Amino acid sequence: MRSSMAERITDILVNNEIIIAENRNLYSYGLQQGLLIFLNIATILGIGMVLNMVWESIIFLLTFVPLRSNAGGYHAKTQVRCYLYSVAMITTTLVGIKIIPWSGVVCLSMTLVAGTIIFFLAPVEAVNKSLGQVEKAVYKKRTRFSLVLFVFLVLLFCYSGQLAISVCIMMGVVVVSIVLVLGRVSK
């Protein structure tokens, strides 16, 4: 459905001479990816609303997305599986944030353990996309920069009495570390 919607939108753009027909596949692919991103964000915010955890889902995403984008890790074999795994992951993460009685010590400890895993494993290549040496170096540098920022934010919010924010950031770091380990062992 999403690809046919993307194709219909692309056809409208070509028919109205907004884009060149030769670029049809590129625009169709871009629209399909954009629709998938929109669907994922809407789903995550929807889960956040159902659990009454919208701001927590946003903070988690603001941590998870940049780390995951650069660190790599496990990738599902189909877009449907990816979507279903993502729904399960965000639901489990938000429920964990909500029901586990977090403390500053546990939050900081988990951040350091997960951060260490990310620091040494990233980037983890996808099965269908290998990285060259330059790409690996760039992704490693970006990952480490983001990681240092998020560890700093966990410390800052934890020590300023904002444990709930620290926990959301920590969970983003923890989930990325799990995805990296899964990506490494599934090769």
Image (cartoon, grey):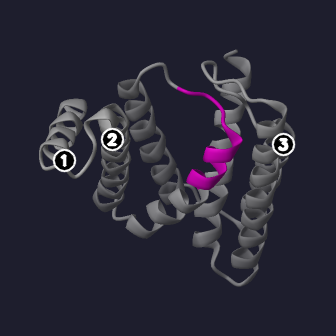
Circle 3 residue: 137
Which sits in the foreground, 37 or 18? 18
**Foreground mark, 3 or 1?**
1
Circle 1 residue: 13
Which sits in the foreground, 173 or 12? 12
Labels 1 & 2 near each other (Cβ < 8 A): yes
How far apart, in angstroms, are the residues tagged by discs 3 and 1?
Answer: 39 Å
- Mark 2 or mark 3: which comes first in sequence? 2
Q: Quadrant of residue 88 in the image?
A: top left
Q: Residue at x 72, y 19 (%)?
A: 185
Q: Which residues are magenta?
A: 64-75
Q: Amino acid at mark 2?
A: Tyr
Q: Residue at x 84, y 42 (%)?
A: 137
How far apart, in angstroms, are the residues tagged by discs 1 and 2?
Answer: 9 Å
Circle 2 residue: 27
Report if residue 85 lies within the magenta region.
Answer: no
Secondary structure of the residue carrying tag 1 is helix
- Mark 3 or mark 1: which comes first in sequence? 1
Total tally of numbered discs in the picture: 3
